[in-house]
Amino acid sequence: MVKKLSIFLGALLAVPCLATNGKMAGAGTAESPWQVADYEDLKAVGLGDYGMNGHYVLVADIDASASRNETSAVDSTAGFQPIGVAYYGTEQSVFDGVFDGGNYTISKLYSMSNNERSTALFMGIGTKGVVKNLKLTDCYFTVKYVWAAASVAVTNSGLVENIELLRDTVRAPGNVGGVVGVNEDGTVKDIDFSGVVFGTNDRDFIGGVVGNNSGEKSVIRNVKVNADMRSNFYGKYLGLVTGYNEGTIVSAEVDGVINYGDTLVGGVTGKNLGTIDSCVSHASIYSMHQKTAGLVGYNSGTIKNSSVEADSIFCEYRGAAGFVGVNDTTGVIENSFVKAKVHSDSSAGFALYNAGVIRNSYVEGSVTADSFPGHFVSGFVLQNVGLITNSYSKADVDAFYKLAGFVVRNSGKIDSSYATGHVLNGERASGDTFGGFVGQNDSTGIITNSYAAGEVVGGMKAGGFVGVNNGKIHNCYATGDVRSYSVFGGFVGENWGEILYAYSTGNLGNIKGYTSSFTAGGFVGANNGYINNAYTTGNVNSEFTPGGFVSSNSGTIKNAYASGDVSGRIEFGGFASANRQYLENVFFAGKLIASSSDYEAPGCFVVNNSGTVKEALYNKDGCEFEADSSAKETAFADMKASALYKGWNDFEKFWLVGDTLSFPHLVFTTGVLPEIIEDGPPIEITKPNVVAVKGANGLKLYGNRQNLQATVTLSRSGMTNVKVYNLKGVLQKVVSLGKMSEGVHQVNLSGAVDARGVALIVLEQNGKALSRTLLR
């Protein structure tokens, strides 16, 4: 993908005459540099006695408008012949001297190449070369068919610093940069570029400062860009700092516009494999295709302390994101934020796809999509298979089909995060999977210590927190109202997984303009999974089969209650409309109300019961219908007595009840999250025989398989190893930590786990072991 300097030097041209026109004062040394005083002197740099290794200094502003009338005698080029072109194809074409602009300005420099070579002020800057303290104004560099163009240098392996470029225009098919075409292990810093960068002919690598930042040692630092960047419909790797980054970008501020481009488009770079730190983008972006984002199109490196504050990020097809298009498995993003308007057929406030790590980041603004089926929209990430932690979205989400306040589809882990924006589908009774936090939580998805506060309006399978849950949700809550057509709940629309320690407070009702709705539950619409230690306080209003806690239960619900009112017409129940499986230690404390005089089949606790109900209560003061034999009648005033809940598992550990509380509340509603006992992974694995360590030894894991970190606590010193086992309990790898002393140690285990799935990590010392499972 990356075109190296050797390729650039490969095509030979006839070497023109090395006669010089300038008559520069000086000796070309550091103490007495050659003095470049006019345009004739500038054309003489690097020719004849004015060597490519010498020292030069600009001593006056240069008006280079005469370059517009010049043509080459040896090739189909016009205007200024780049420094080094006389030696093009040889080592001498690389400038290894020092060119000090003295803060003077070269203006109206013109250089054009048709099909023989690239163009810029310098053909190439070598590893010892320095170009500094220079201003270029109203200059024009263009290549019609071949490789690259830039204002200062086609290639740089040295140092380019303190350069100011005003109203410059650079055009080329690829490797086109406002300052440097290809920065190959060089440094470009202290840059201020304002102008036009144009990629032509469906090519790649277009950047406001550098077209292609190639090599791990390449550095772009302290740059400011205000560019009008353009490409055609099929250009790739576009960024207002660089089109492609393998090195380091630090302290960049970008503004302007990116127009068109096919894919891999970002305000700072199209693709990042290196490090981006402390960068800000204010650029508006319009792209034709996928992997378009406010900062980076595709990331497999590290991005930190960076932000996007833009009016518009727009992609015609397949997705736009506020910050990064794709954050791949090795990608790490931290301490970053977005304040922007994002729009596409599928769009996300922060990232379209995350397989890496995102932490301590947030989104504000709005996220929208076109109004027809198949389009997904979320406040933070469309699809997560990695780790998201300590992050939030305040963005409003408006679209049609699958919507979520934070993540549309989660197959990874989300921890300590929240969403507060609304999730609206335009009051349509169509589309499915709407969640105030997550649309669909897959079987491998884990959500912990998180909440959603926005209103949710969706066609069906809508939940204040999650639309459809197949995985695990622990220590979470939702406070937003939910309006839907079918299968909706204050916390989850449809549950097939596990929900522990959760609550909802939002009210449930119909979509505007629709008088009927089905399968509404104050906490969950339809439950086919496991729910333990949960409650809801929201009111439920649905014409058909509403339930105060659940509409239809075919799973297990334990230690749970509903205290909101239930209003319905057909088969409306205080706690549930239908129970086909198992209810234990549950109660309904609200009122049951018929919404129409032609009501049918109410139930003070449950309407249709073909399952098991144990230790159930309902508020007899709130039900004017026939007594319900499936549960015990209890006066409303007595329902807060702690004696009623003595059979609940760990009631005193997870619940509070007192004079100021009408009903029990989970401990974490007061701000303290209960400890979650470590459970096994979604896939059971066969563990090798291990001996439990006695004492204070411990092992905690952080990150993912590409960036796995561990805190090792040892109660004694000794030879210590970490062993990694696969799904079948077969030893895969041993990481020797050597002799470790008593105490707490931070250990880097990156690379210890190779493949996806579930691994067993075993800490072993002196023949004893402690194990932890890791979802990879």
Image (cartoon, rainbow, N blue to C red):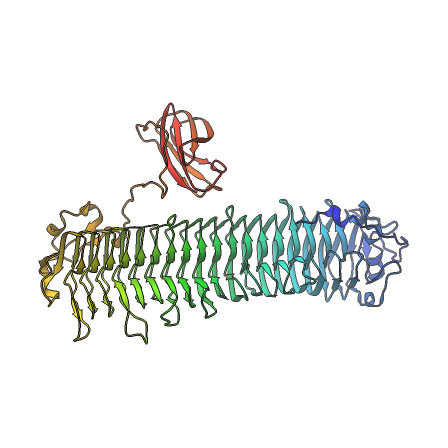
Residue 556 against residue 365 in the figure, above or below: above
- Closer-to-camera residue (254/15): 15
- Residue 454: tell me if it is visible: no
Q: Position of residue 384 (x, y in %)?
A: 44, 52
Total numbered labels placed on residues in the image? 0
Residue farthest along the front direction in this orientation: 610
Q: Residue at x 50, y 61 (%)?
A: 322
- Residue 396: tell me if it is visible: yes
- Closer-to-camera residue (599/46): 599
Residue 520 against residue 703 in the figure, above or below: below
| Relative to 585, 677 lies left or right | right
Q: Position of residue 313 (x, y in %)?
A: 53, 65
Q: Position of residue 25 (x, y in %)?
A: 85, 54
Q: Quadrant of the C terminus?
A: top left
- Closer-to-camera residue (136/213): 213
Q: Position of residue 409 (x, y in %)?
A: 41, 56
Residue 127 against residue 368 in the figure, above or below: above
